[in-house]
Image (spheres, rainbow, N blue to C red):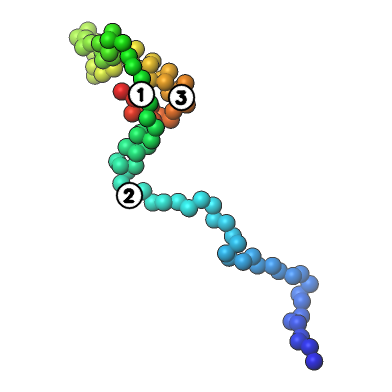
Amino acid sequence: MGTKKPPSSGSDHHYPDPAAISHGKKKFKITNWATYNKALVNRGSLTFWLDESAIQAWYEKPGTSSRGRPQRYSELSISTVLMLKRVFRLTLRAAQGVH
């Protein structure tokens, strides 16, 4: 005698194997954000040379005529970092390490 199958309700349900379900990329919980951010800034290393006049002009000269917080970096330094960011396709965090 053979085994009896349970009666079908008209539609066969298939339940996938739990081991076969993909849950995507495993996520890690970041607990030390300062170290994580520093690692992202230091991920790539870029070395370049500036001439002496560019080094002298890197920081903004303090001015007393404008109101508000004084600027730390000059227009030359800001445009240089933005150009490097664009040319080397750096993220904002990676460009933060350039100074």
Lower position in the chain sequence, tag 1 or tag 2: 2
* Residue beneath disc 3: 88
Nearer the observer: mark 1 or 2; the answer is 1
* Residue beneath disc 2: 31
Nearer the observer: mark 2 or 3; the answer is 3
Please provide percent x and percent y for residue 92: 40, 29
Please provide percent x and percent y for residue 98: 34, 25
Q: Secondary structure at mark 2?
A: loop
The residue at 76%/75% (across/down) is 9
Task: Examine the image and state in which quarter residue 97 appears.
Answer: top left
Residue 16 or residue 10, whichever sits in front? 16
The quadrant of the rendering that contains the N terminus is: bottom right
| Label 2: few (<14), some (14–19) or many (≥20) C-alpha neighbours in 10 Å | few
Residue 24 or residue 51, whichever sits in front? 51
Q: Secondary structure at mark 3?
A: loop
> Callout 3, which amino acid?
Phe
The residue at 79%/72% (across/down) is 10
Lower position in the chain sequence, tag 3 or tag 1: 1
Q: Is residue 88 above or below residue 39?
A: above
As drawn, the label of residue 47 is: 1
Q: CA distance from mark 1 to mark 2?
A: 31 Å
| Label 3: few (<14), some (14–19) or many (≥20) C-alpha neighbours in 10 Å | few
Contact (Cβ within 8 Å) of mark 1 with mark 2: no
> Callout 2, which amino acid?
Thr
User: Does residue 68 appear anywhere in the picture?
Assistant: no
